[in-house]
Image: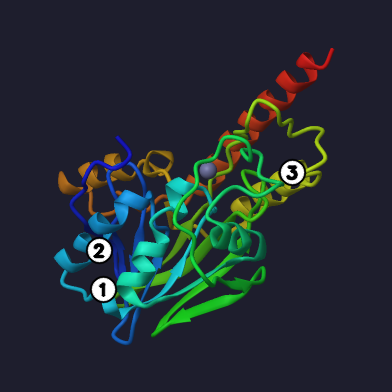
């Protein structure tokens, strides 16, 4: 139930979960404007907007919309959110081209199976390491391809009083593809394995107090929320979470490559 409603909540400091129960959308606020990461499905946009308002924020104060990767379950709602907020949409060059097309483009391991979604007329292309600002919010882009060529992980700091924590919104690193695509040998995305390797090392090297992911289950968001509700104030803080996720993703990729090699014999 990807689009099941979810009551929004503060994760820590200026960072809020405003997505659905099955798909993340993260609001990072400041007095002079907010940033939003990911738009979930096309039909998720009204829920995300209602969640932003339920927290007491104005949707018109969202100045910047960012994306993890340009599949319909994370970028599908972006155009409706852009229209409702007037925000600028920014993404890696490959993701920008995909979001402007509103459908899969060659190079996507899921090219032949991804669903289309409402395209965004203009997406500002960004570069690896670029810092994007919305009001006083500053987010750093880390290109972490593999799942798609344009995958991007976002990092920022959120503070409560004197305590500041490093957030990592890590893009999906799962080797999922259409049946006709092999990560270990293909002509449309020859850098796939090198991109995965780069992404795992990025994930391992980032300072990571709080891990979030486009699919909330991959970072145990609701287990952590339940733990916090029952008294563990630091349930979202887990400095090993990024390293564990990288390790799990490496294991998945190794298994996938072994299967591809077996199938080729
Ligand atoms: Zn995806």
Mark 1 closeness class: few <14, some 14–19, many ≥20 residues within 10 Å: many
Nearer-N-terminus badge (2/3): 2
Mark 2 near ligand 1 (CB under 8 Å)?
no
Whether the residues at callouts 2 and 3 have beta carbons within 8 Å, the answer is no
> On residue 192, which mark appears?
3
Q: Residue at x 47, y 46 (%)?
A: 241
Mark 3 near ligand 1 (CB under 8 Å)?
no
Nearer-N-terminus badge (2/1): 2
The quadrant the N terminus occupies is: top left
Residue 198 on image: x %, y % = 72, 51
Q: Residue at x 66, y 32 (%)?
A: 253
What residue is shown with label 2?
49
Whether the residues at callouts 2 and 1 have beta carbons within 8 Å, the answer is yes
Cα distance in 3D space between marks 1 and 3: 37 Å
Cα distance in 3D space between marks 2 and 3: 35 Å
Q: Secondary structure at mark 1?
A: helix
Asked where in the image residue 175 lies, by quadrant, the reply is top right
What residue is shown with label 1?
59
Q: Is residue 214 visible?
A: no
Q: Residue 262, relative to residue 236: is it above or below? A: above
């Amino acid at each position: 139930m990807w689009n099941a409603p979810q009551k929004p909540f503060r994760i820590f400091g200026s960072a809020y979960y405003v997505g659905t129960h099955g798909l993340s959308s993260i609001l990072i606020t400041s007095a002079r404007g907010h940033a939003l990461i990911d738009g979930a499905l096309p039909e998720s946009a009204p829920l995300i907007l209602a969640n932003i308002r339920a927290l007491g924020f104005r949707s018109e104060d969202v100045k910047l919309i960012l994306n993890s990767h340009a599949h319909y379950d994370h970028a599908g709602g972006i155009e409706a959110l852009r229209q409702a907020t007037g925000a600028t949409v920014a993404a890696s060059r490959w993701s920008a081209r995909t979001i402007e097309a509103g459908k899969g483009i060659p190079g996507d391991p899921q090219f032949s199976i991804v669903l289309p979604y409402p395209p965004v007329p203009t997406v500002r292309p960004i570069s690896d390491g670029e810092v994007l600002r919305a009001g006083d919010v500053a987010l750093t882009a880390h290109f972490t391809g593999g799942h798609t060529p344009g995958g991007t992980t976002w990092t920022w700091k959120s503070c409560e009083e004197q305590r500041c924590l490093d957030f990592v919104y890590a893009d999906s690193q799962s080797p999922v593809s259409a049946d006709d695509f092999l990560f270990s040998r293909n002509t449309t995305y020859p850098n796939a394995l090198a991109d995965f390797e780069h992404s795992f090392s990025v994930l391992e090297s980032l300072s990571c107090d709080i891990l979030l992911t486009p699919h909330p289950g991959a970072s145990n968001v609701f287990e952590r929320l339940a733990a916090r509700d029952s008294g563990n104030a630091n349930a979202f803080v887990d400095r090993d979470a990024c390293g564990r996720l990288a390790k799990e993703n490496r294991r998945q990729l190794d298994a996938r490559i072994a299967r591809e090699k077996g199938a080729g014999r």
